Image (cartoon, rainbow, N blue to C red):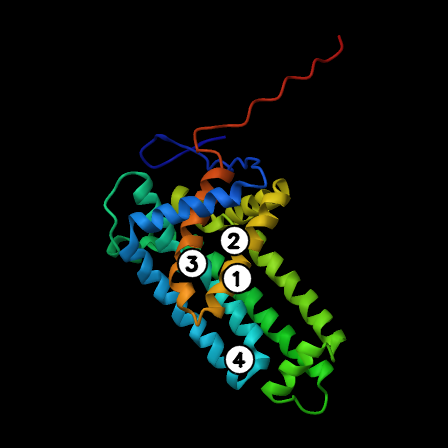
Amino acid sequence: MSQQNDTGTAAEEPVFPTVREVDAGAPLRWIRRGIDDFRACPIPSLFYGFCFAVMGLLVTMVFEHAYEYTAAMTSGFLLLGPFLAMGLYEISRRHEEGQVCALLPTLTVWRRNAGNIGIFAVVLGVIFLVWARASLVIFALFYTNELPNLSGFLNQLVTLENLEFLLVYFCVGLLFACIVFAASVISVPLMLDRNQDAISSMLASIGALARNPGAMAVWALLIVILTIIGFLSFHLGLVVLMPVVGHASWHAYRDLVAPAGDAPPPTAPVEQAP
């Protein structure tokens, strides 16, 4: 039931987003559209790309000097990604509407829905802290005496000498990655575009994953592959690939969530027996 505001007019209740089904090849189209956005707005896109590259350099520096904290830093890279990509979402939105590509308006786009974006940041921050602690606990359980140096640790990874550690670490890390991916795949664009609250945005994001497991698996795999390529190219690839992923995420949101005016078809009323 709608409520009335101070002026006496009826205030509309927030509508829960309608999640649509997409085919498994949709992520490839999102990447292609992301490339188009990058080409149309290269300067502001490259600014965010350099920000991602700096984050990648920090992860590499931690790995070289304290590899046991690398998982935590990598998680921070993935957790900060959706927030750093907010400017890229705004660039794609402006390009979509035929507006001028400019960096300055994208730097403060978070102000549109600062409260709910802050709630979302707290949720991801808690997940990050739990995963960082879990990572250190796993290292402590499997390396009870002393951690090997970096070369020794890499040798164990290559030779699968400590297979139990790898399996446990991979499974726990995959669990946290799935949680973050499910909660954030479309939630930030939704909060920015429709001023949606954080809870319903995350629920809609989880719903998008549940309704499109094939497409979301392909999308997650593409993100991982492009991120790895970015790191292996001495972080130079991150300058281009991460903006493309950010732009593509906006188009993923556009495909996965029906426009605000589109409502699901009403269900037929059930006839009652006389």
**Left of 265 or right of it: where is 52?**
left
In this rendering, the answer to whether 147 lies above or below 18 is below
In this rendering, the label closer to the viewer, 2 or 1: 2
Mark 4 surroundings: few (<14), some (14-19) or many (≥20) residues within 10 A:
some
**Secondary structure beneath label 3:** helix
In this rendering, the label closer to the viewer, 1 or 3: 3
CA–CA distance in space, label 2 to label 1? 9 Å
- Residue topped by disc 1: 124
In this rendering, the answer to whether 204 lies above or below 153 is above
Label annotation for residue 184: 2
CA–CA distance in space, label 4 to label 2? 26 Å
- Residue topped by disc 4: 63
**Secondary structure beneath label 2:** helix
CA–CA distance in space, label 1 to label 4? 22 Å
**Secondary structure beneath label 1:** helix
CA–CA distance in space, label 2 to label 3? 19 Å
In this rendering, the label closer to the viewer, 4 or 2: 4
**Left of 105 or right of it: where is 266?**
right
Residue reaching furthest to the bottom: 145
Tags 2 and 1 touching, CB below 8 Å? yes
Q: Earlier in the sequence, mark 1 or mark 3?
A: 1
Label annotation for residue 241: 3
Q: Earlier in the sequence, mark 4 or mark 2?
A: 4
Whole-percent x, y for residue 232 in the image: 49, 69
Q: Earlier in the sequence, mark 2 or mark 3?
A: 2
Kindly identify the amino acid type of the residue bearing the numbered disc 3. Answer: Leu
**Secondary structure beneath label 4:** helix
Taking depth in this image into account, of 75 and 263 the one nearest to the observer is 75
Q: Earlier in the sequence, mark 3 or mark 4?
A: 4
Mark 1 surroundings: few (<14), some (14-19) or many (≥20) residues within 10 A:
some
